[in-house]
């Protein structure tokens, strides 16, 4: 056991910490080892609580300021504001039920999403000091959850996509994301240009990284402002959770973003 989770950090600029958790540095066991904070995948509640506290200590925040939803592969978005933070217990759980993207302009609040082959997308608006975390599985990607979240940020925080910084985190690569014809057809029927985001081997393969990158570009995010982790969870299941490799009863990667002071950023990412 370690005293802090091993995190994969992204540089989005001063005043913000963005990361994806690895499997290392926690107390969970078996297919959940070592670091998992997802309540909905079958892990021990005691291990989850210990891992959550460990992460909060590492980030320097109270546990009630660590926020992540119960995802359902939809497009619902939750704004985390002062009224949300006043919620506790079942009321907070209800507010986060069926949500696949969270956003906030509050400092000292860590928002994130859980994945294990799906694509996490993190957004930072340095002009209006707003952030978002998006869970983009194939269903959410096909439903354009990234574009829905950008529109919500524009409406709520006056975000201008041209100034956004974005991260596309660890997820399954095109080479390993084999899908049935019905999945390919859903993307096609949703109006995507399939040539740059798919390839035919014995079956169709979809490039979820590229599909989400193109959604960001279509919304006006500049290509040079989009980082791609380039880590395939299926090929790197020893370091990052992969449901296709480990089964659904396994841990989840936590990809998150937090606005803090510059001094705290230096301490957390060094």
Image (spheres, rainbow, N blue to C red):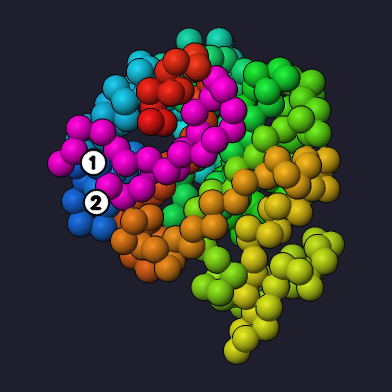
Q: Quadrant of the C terminus?
A: top left
Number of marks: 2
Question: Within 10 angstroms of label 2, few (less than 14), some, or many (20 or more) residues?
Answer: many
Q: Earlier in the sequence, mark 1 or mark 2?
A: 1
Residue at point 68%, 23% (across, down): 126
Q: Is mark 2 on a helix, strand or loop?
A: loop
- Give the magenta part as a residue range: 1-24
Rendered location of residue 48, percent (x, y): 27, 37
> Observer-nearest residue: 98 or 108?
108
Does the stretch in magenta take in 170? no
> Observer-nearest residue: 75 or 23?
23
Rendered location of residue 14, percent (x, y): 57, 22
Above or below, 241 relative to 257: below
Q: Can residue 118 be seen in this view?
A: no
Residue 33's disc is 2
Image quarter for residue 133?
top right
Q: Are the residues flagged by discs 1 and 2 in contact, CB closer than 8 Å? A: yes
Residue indicated by mark 1 = 26
């Amino acid at each position: 056991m370690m005293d802090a989770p091993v995190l994969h950090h992204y540089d989005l600029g001063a005043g913000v910490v963005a990361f994806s958790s690895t499997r290392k540095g926690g107390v969970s066991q078996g297919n959940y080892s070592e670091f998992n904070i997802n309540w909905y995948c079958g892990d021990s509640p005691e291990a989850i609580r210990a891992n959550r506290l460990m992460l909060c200590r590492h980030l320097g925040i109270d546990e009630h300021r660590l926020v992540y939803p119960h995802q359902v592969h939809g497009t619902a978005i939750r704004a985390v504001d002062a009224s949300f933070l006043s919620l506790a217990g079942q009321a907070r759980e209800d507010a986060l039920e069926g949500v696949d993207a969270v956003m906030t302009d509050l400092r000292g609040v860590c928002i994130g999403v859980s994945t294990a082959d799906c694509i996490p997308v993190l957004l930072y608006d340095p002009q209006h000091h707003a952030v978002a975390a998006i869970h983009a599985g194939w269903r959410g990607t096909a439903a354009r959850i990234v574009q829905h979240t950008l529109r919500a940020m524009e409406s709520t925080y006056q975000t201008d996509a041209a100034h956004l910084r974005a991260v596309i985190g660890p997820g399954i690569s095109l080479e390993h994301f084999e899908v049935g014809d019905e999945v390919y057809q859903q993307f096609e029927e949703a109006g995507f240009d399939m040539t740059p985001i798919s390839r035919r081997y014995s079956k169709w393969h979809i490039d979820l990284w590229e599909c989400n990158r193109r959604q960001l570009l279509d919304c006006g995010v500049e290509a040079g402002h989009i980082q791609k982790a380039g880590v395939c969870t299926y090929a790197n299941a020893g370091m990052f959770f992969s449901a296709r490799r480990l089964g659904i009863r396994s841990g989840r990667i936590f990809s998150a973003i937090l606005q803090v002071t510059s001094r705290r950023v230096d301490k957390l990412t060094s």
